Image: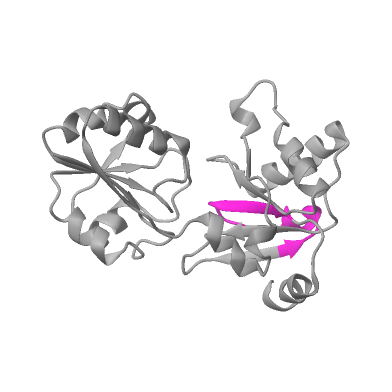
């Protein structure tokens, strides 16, 4: 049969028409939601799509057992944002190809493009980094700072994705502590994007200490800006809170 990778986009209603038509013909619909703090409940997706959705655990995605079902059924894996925003999903395509399982990919908007609403130009972003939740790690990793340093060296902005469950106060504290430990400086002002692409979207541009006191809801990401051109500076001063 067929395995479908479908991006949900940023809101509960932003799935593509062609993807929704396919979705309604499938035998099983799964949702991968272990990598992001979903900005809306699964019930809202079910109501919007008109189908029953089953949450899929990380292990079931990583061990590729979902492909076994796709040999006999039409199976969908829904992914928040774009369908290929994680390497695990590329691996599923490779394995499907290896096992001669037909597959199709439906793309959608993701945080990688939604951040353009800050006014920063997408072509000026460097490597994307992830900030882990130190509560889940005993060694408190600071490797994400190396990406910031590398991007700053070529005057590129850094999109910093925050781990699931990481609240804004802790994220800023981790950023400040990591900056002190690594001697890698961050600008006086950084950007926080909350609930990007949804009706509850909010974008903040302020000093890290001030952002800690803002009511910034999950999911959110941080952007460490590098050198700004005139248009970017004007956008940040005009468009952002």
Q: In this view, does 56 lie to the left or right of 72?
A: right
Q: In this picture, which residue range is highlighted in magenta?
A: 205-224
The answer to whether any part of residue 22 appears in the image is yes
Percent across and percent down for residue 58 are 38, 30
- The residue at the point 19 percent across, 61 percent down is 21
- The residue at the point 67 percent across, 55 percent down is 125
User: Which is nearer the eye, 212 or 188?
Assistant: 188
Percent across and percent down for residue 49 are 23, 60
The answer to whether any part of residue 174 appears in the image is no
Work out which residue is located at the far top of the displayed protein and give it: 138
Residue 217 in magenta? yes
Residue 84 in magenta? no
Query: Exactly how many numbered labels are in the figure?
Result: 0
Q: In this view, does 222 lie above or below 206?
A: above
In which quadrant of the rendered view does residue 62 lie? top left
- The residue at the point 40 percent across, 58 percent down is 108
Percent across and percent down for residue 106 are 32, 54
Percent across and percent down for residue 176 are 80, 42
In which quadrant of the rendered view does residue 98 lie? top left
In which quadrant of the rendered view does residue 101 lie? top left
């Amino acid at each position: 049969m067929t395995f479908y990778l479908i991006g949900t986009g940023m809101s509960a209603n932003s799935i593509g028409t062609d993807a929704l038509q396919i979705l309604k013909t499938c035998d099983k619909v799964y949702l991968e939601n272990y990598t992001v703090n979903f900005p809306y409940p699964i019930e809202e997706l079910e109501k919007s799509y008109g189908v029953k959705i089953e949450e899929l655990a990380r292990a079931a995605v990583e061990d590729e057992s979902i492909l076994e079902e796709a040999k006999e059924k039409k199976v969908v894996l829904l992914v928040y944002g774009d369908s290929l925003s994680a390497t695990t999903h590329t691996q599923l395509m490779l394995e499907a190809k290896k096992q001669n399982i037909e597959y199709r990919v439906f793309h959608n908007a993701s945080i990688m493009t939604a951040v353009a609403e800050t006014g920063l130009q997408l072509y000026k972003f460097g490597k994307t980094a992830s900030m882990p939740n130190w509560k889940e790690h005993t060694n408190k990793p600071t490797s994400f700072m190396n990406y910031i340093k590398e991007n700053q060296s070529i005057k590129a902005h850094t999109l910093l994705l925050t781990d699931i469950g990481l609240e804004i106060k802790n994220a800023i504290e981790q950023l400040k502590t990591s900056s002190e430990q690594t001697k890698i400086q961050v600008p006086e002002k950084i950007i926080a994007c909350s609930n990007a692409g949804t009706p509850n979207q909010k974008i903040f541009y302020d000093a890290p200490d001030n952002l800690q006191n803002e009511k910034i809801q999950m999911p959110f990401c941080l952007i460490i800006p590098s050198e700004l051109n005139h248009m970017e500076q004007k956008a940040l001063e005009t468009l952002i809170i």
